[in-house]
Structure formats: structure tokens, C-alpha cells
Image (spheres, rainbow, N blue to C red):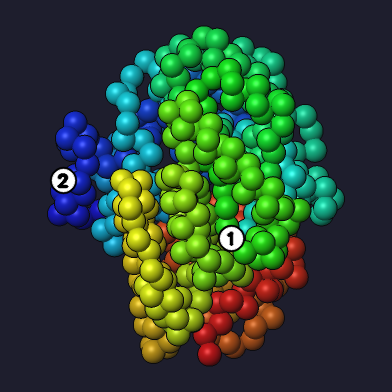
Amino acid sequence: MPKPLVREYNQSRILQNRNKPICLAPFKSLRFLPDGNITVCCHNNSFSLGKYPDTSIMSAWNSNELEFLRKKMDKADFSAGCQDCLSSFEEKQFASVNPLLYENYSDNSKFPVILDFKSATECNLMCVMCSEYSSSAIRRCTDSKLYSEASVYDKDFVEEIKTIIPHIAEARFSGGEPFLNDIYYDLWYAIIEKNPNCKISIQTNGTIYNSKVQSILESGQIHINVSVDAVDPELYQKIRINGNLEKVKENIFKFSEYSKLKNTSFGITACAMRDNAYELSEIFKLANSVGAKLWYSDVHFPLVNALWVMKSDELDKIVEFLNNQKLEPNSEMSLHNAVVFKDLIGRIEQLALAANRREHSSKLLINPTKLVEKLSKVMRKSTLVHPGTWTKIKLALSQFNECKMIDLSIEISKYYNTDFAFQQLGQMSYETLIKNFACLIVD
């Protein structure tokens, strides 16, 4: 990232962090993925520090890989799997860049101060933007063999985590649906017992609120974040298959009241995508009505759900609609949410400009044959390790003959980790790949 941009961002940071690396995740956090891989944050799922149980937790923390990533961040270099965060910096949307999630807490060189668990994939929903990687419901529906063996995260893992719990300031839990995972309950009670001041943050789909959930809420200081992608019940059910919006809203109010009573944070996160573009302002209003901190997460894959592949006139209409919504912030929280909402509109505006440039310059487009050639170079390592998957991807692209398409290789090279992009494409069926690649066609 250019040094002037780094300096400008640093001026927006809290005072004690202005001379520190651009992102502090590698200095504070460890994240546990379903397959055992250990990374540092929720936006870099590809740069692995090792794989549990072959790599112990503290071995990952003291690894050469982590030191390498720290040096990258010290140079504001996003090339080691951190590409997803770059665009927000380039657009100077400093109020909603992902590294803000790691600005709090003093770092401790001997131990991580944040533990981030995405180790569970039990889920009751089949969201259209999700995959078998994160949802057991999708795996059951597709008869997937992914994670066919027992989870690597067992009682031994919990015991190892217990040795680190006294040193952490926050533990974050996502899924899947966290409230369906037994190991998570073991970890929550262990944290409450050994480090009662530790912040426990849970990202839930909001569908579950039972006696088991009630018990954990009463036992500790739990910080809840609910995922909501639509306020219209019919649209919500189309996006979050198996979900019931009325039940979720009922639980949102319960979580909101709990947070007020316990003085804990409460948030609402929405995926920003093609499917719900005209609902994003309604989600803003919902967050304000329950005193929730708002966050929009951009969907990049699947392409059929992503905003960035849409035509410029479609994106312009979305921007115009969102800009015309009457949003009236009346509290400190709603003022924060207004900034987040404005940044979201700014990102969509940039997508519209990029789409317009593509549509008016054939030099920015590519035919499928050339795209296969470029992708084979960009994703060379993955194509060699998974030749069968690569054959499927090539065959799907070949169905479009000489159509002019968005050059996916450029987007992957600049903004995505190549292994992650290959995984996202590879996990799709052949028919689904064709539907996704059709979104790249520019008339």
C-alpha cells in the first residue's frame, strides 16, 4: 500500500496505534478453521500457520509463518492472503476497514490476546451465499463427504485452550451456528470459570434461543452479533433457507434486552450482495431500532450473488436507491451506523465505475480461452494439486465460446488469495460453475 495512504489511515487510528503496523491481527490473534488450519483472522483464511493437532496452538503462535506475516503487515503488504482488505483502504473507507477488529487490547508477545473460533460447522440453515465448508445442513442436502471424519477439535483441544484462557482478552465464535456446537459450550464455560472478564463474542444466525442458550447468557458477559440479510420475510427465507424471520426478530429483541441489561455490545451484520441490495437500508433501520452496531460484509463468491460482477446501470440504480433513503440517526450508535452505511454506498459506487470502464473498453475484457490460460498461471499451485477440479473449471469456461468476459484473473490477483479463489470455484458443481461464469459476460 502506498506510504501516503498508510500515513493518512494512521491519522484516523486511535493514538496508541498510529505508529504500529497497518493490521494488528498477526500480533494479537489466532483463528481456528474447521479443517484444523490455524490462521490469524476472519478475512485471511488461506495463510496457514499450521494444522491442528499436528501443530499445537502455541507452536502456531511462535511459528516462522506468523513472523513472516507480521513483517508483511509492518510493510503494509497485503499479498499474503490479506488481499480482501485492500480495496477498502484504497477507497479510504477508514471507518469500516476490517483491521479495526484488532485495534483494541494491548498485544502480548508470549500469548495471543484474541482467540477466534470458526472450528464448528453445525448449522440449521442453507444460505445461498454459503457452502458445504461452513454449513452441515448444506452438506447433508448435497451428500457431501467434506468433514466426513470426526472433528479434530475434541476434548484435548479444549484442555489445550484452557492453558491459554487466562491470557486472552476476547474469544470470538462463529460457524456454522455456534449455539449448535457442544465444544463451544465447553469453551464458554471454561472461559467464564478461568477468565470471567474475558469478552465472549458470538456470531449467530439468530434462529436459536432456548434454555441452553439462556443458561450461557446468564453465566457470563456474552457479546452477541446476529446475521440478518433481509427485513422482508419472503426475501429473508429465499436467502437464509430454513430460516424464519419472525422468530429471528423475536430473538433479536431478546438479545438486545440482554445486552442492555448486562451492558455488553450487540451487533447486526448483513451480507451485501445482489440478492438483498434494495434491503440494505432496511437492515440499517433495524439495527438502529434495537441499538445494534451495524456491519456490512461484502460477498465476493459465489459470483451469482456478488455485486462486483453486476452491470454498471444495475449498480447505479442501487446507489441511487440507497442514497434516496431517509435515514435519520438519533444516537451515537446510529451515527456510527450511518458512517458504515455511507461507506457501503461508496464501495458500490466504485463497483459501478469499474463496471462502466469494463463496458466501454474491450481491452479490459477477455475471452474464455485466454481467461483459462491466465487463470492457470494465477492459480498454478492449486491446479497442480487438484487437477480434476481444474479440469471441471476449464470445461465450464469453455461453454461460453468467444464471449467477452470480466478478466477474473486480474480480480483474483489483486484482491483475493489464489488458493481461496480456487477453493471457492472448485467446491461448486459443474452446473453451478456455468451459472457463476455466466455472470462474467459483458454484452
Is the residue marked by circle 1 packed among few (<14), some (14-19), or many (20+) residues within 10 Å? many
Q: Mark 2 points at which residue?
A: 11
Q: Name the residue under label 1.
A: 231
| Type of amino acid under label 1 | Val
Q: Quadrant of residue 182?
A: top right
Q: Nearer the viewer, residue 330 or 437?
A: 330
| Type of amino acid under label 2 | Gln
Is the residue marked by circle 2 packed among few (<14), some (14-19), or many (20+) residues within 10 Å? few
For marks 1 and 2, give the CA distance: 37 Å
* Residue 16 seen in the figure: yes
Residue found at x 72% / y 31%: 210
Residue 77, position in %: x, y?
Answer: 30, 47
Residue found at x 65% / y 22%: 215
Please give left or right for residue 1 compared with residue 156 in the image: left
Please give left or right for residue 145 compared with residue 174 in the image: right
Relative vertical location of residue 19 with respect to residue 420 in this rendering, above or below: above
Q: Which mark is in front, 1 or 2?
A: 1
Residue 297, position in %: x, y?
Answer: 48, 54
Residue 404, position in %: x, y?
Answer: 53, 86
**Which SS class for mark 1?**
loop
Residue found at x 58% / y 17%: 219
Q: Nearer the viewer, residue 65 or 289?
A: 289
Residue 29, position in %: x, y?
Answer: 42, 29
Relative vertical location of residue 278 with respect to residue 201 in this rendering, above or below: below
Q: Quadrant of residue 64?
A: top left
Q: Quadrant of residue 203?
A: top right
Residue found at x 67% / y 54%: 245
**Which SS class for mark 2?**
helix
The mark nearer the N terminus, 1 or 2, is 2
